[in-house]
Image: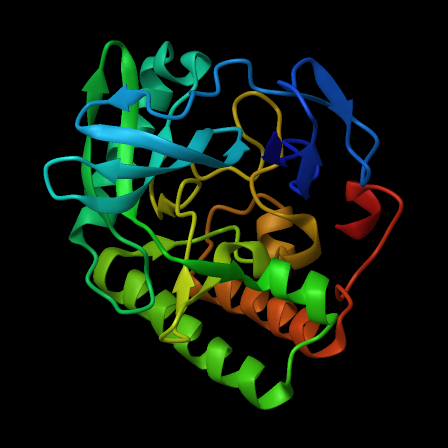
Amino acid sequence: MRLKLTCKHCRRNIQIEGDHEISGSIECPNCSKHIEIPSNILDVDTMVGGFRIEKHLGSGSMGCVYLARQVSMDRQVALKVLPPHVTSDEEELNNFFHEVRTLAKMDHPNIVTAFEAGESNNTYFLAMTYVAGETLEEKLMREKMIDQDLAIKIAIKIGDALNYAWEKFHLLHRDLKPENIMIDEPSGEPKLLDLGISKIVGDDARKTISSDGFLVGTPYYMSPEQAQNREDLDIRSDIYSLGCTLYHLVTGEVPYSGENVMQVL
């Protein structure tokens, strides 16, 4: 069994494998903090609403993402399923449906959109366009760095997507990094992923530190103003993160390093 997790302390992406069901907790290889492994990962062929689970793709603080098939349309989708601790919190649940409504309004070739959300047997889910390909983080792990011309083309298209989200919806991504950009196959188009912690500027949930004390965003790519938890964030914060991402792509190194999150910030 293979699981893809995101450390809620440092936001580093982690892959773990095992011959049997994986449970309990592990130590993050980046920050050494303990990460609880989700115990509610759905089995293959489980039905959630009108969707049949085909494969677990990854897990984070806002739930698990699966490759699923929408039975009525016979098409593959990316299905986000919220964990119980989120669905039992009215504020978090409202944030989830706010995310759905915002994503559903978007129409941009470089932004992954949502098309259905709901609840089935007390399981809340969000169906999004499935992008068959690999993230820039996975590409970096394999190739170490990316050709400069290609990296610039990707950055221009993602920059246009960020500008669209800001101009049309006053929306910031707040966690832009190689892991959240996927290259679609076979078109080669970059797709902006994971708007789960994006916030409309002006919302109460704009904080750099979430209500449960965890960092919102990834320190290696975070703008100084976001790290300072300033209330006047605008698109320049995302452009800063895009610049850090571009630096990582062409050099193979993150722009800043440190022994812990605070040193990086």
Judged left or right of residue 200, residue 168 is left
Judged left or right of residue 196, residue 15 is right
| Residue found at the very far left of the displayed protein | 72
Observer-nearest of 180 and 234: 180
Which color scheme did the rendering employ for the protein?
rainbow
> Measured from the top left, where is residue 109 in percent x and y?
27, 69
Residue 94's image quarter? top left
| Residue found at the very far bottom of the displayed protein | 149
> Measured from the top left, where is residue 118 in percent x and y?
19, 25
> Measured from the top left, where is residue 21 in percent x and y?
62, 18
Observer-nearest of 42 and 175: 42
> Measured from the top left, where is residue 157 in percent x and y?
40, 77
Observer-nearest of 59 and 263: 59
Q: Residue at x 62, y 59 (%)?
A: 137
**In the picture, which quadrant includes the N terminus?**
top right
Q: Residue at x 25, y 48 (%)?
A: 103
| Residue found at the very far right of the displayed protein | 259
Q: Residue at x 34, y 30 (%)?
A: 53
Observer-nearest of 237 and 131: 131
Q: Residue at x 29, y 68 (%)?
A: 164
Q: Is residue 162 above or below residue 246?
A: above
Residue 77's image quarter? top left
Number of marks drawn: 0
